[in-house]
Image (cartoon, rainbow, N blue to C red):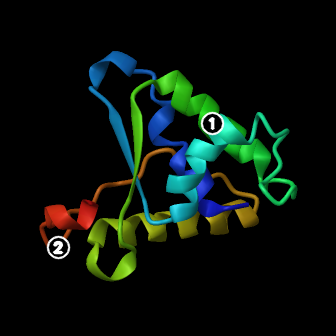
Amino acid sequence: MHRGLTSSDEPTSTSARDSYEKIVVYADALLVVNGISSAEHTWPKRDWLTRENEPVLNPDLWQELVRLKKRAGRVEFRHVKAHKTNPYNRRVDKLAQESADLAWQGQVAPKKVARRRARAKPNREQFR
């Protein structure tokens, strides 16, 4: 299971659709940022096969992400540089790893996570 796919569905599952202008999902995985377009438009028309006629990996996760994106409405996916320069990305990676570890142990990850203040203020360029 791809951790980027499963963590990307959280922001789109909100029930407060009208309380925001749009949702921006920042992902360090180009697979998610580039794949959402294929998952939405190309793969369903090709019976979930790639250009090489190979089965798309994790089609159930892609289908769920597309379903959540459509339900949430205004959603945009943007790529962000990973790890070294982005304290938020490091924090999200740590939370994703902790959740994956709990899942392997048969436990459920907590629904809410205590927020920590980032040590350094983010530079807008980190999110482009």
- Assess disc 2: are there few (<14), some (14-19) or many (≥20) residues with their C-alpha within 10 Å of its C-alpha: few
Of discs 1 and 2, which sits in the foreground?
A: 1
Give me the residue at 30% from left, 55% from top: 115
Where's residue 38, x and y in %? Answer: 63, 45
Q: Quadrant of the C terminus?
A: bottom left
**Local SS, label 2:** loop
Side (left or right) of 23 relative to 96: left
Where's residue 127, x and y in %? Answer: 26, 60
Q: Quadrant of the N terminus?
A: bottom right
Vertical side of 50 occupied by 48: above or below: above
**Dot 1 corresponds to which residue?**
40
Vertical side of 45 occupied by 78: above or below: below
Residue type indicated by callout 2: Arg
- Residue 77's tag is none
Judge whether residue 21 can be spotted in this image: yes
Give me the residue at 87% from left, 55% from top: 53
- Residue 119's tag is 2
Q: Nearer the viewer, residue 7 or 59?
A: 59
**Local SS, label 1:** helix
Where's residue 16, x and y in %? Answer: 38, 21
- Rounded to the nearest whole Å, what is the CA distance between mark 1 and mark 2? 37 Å
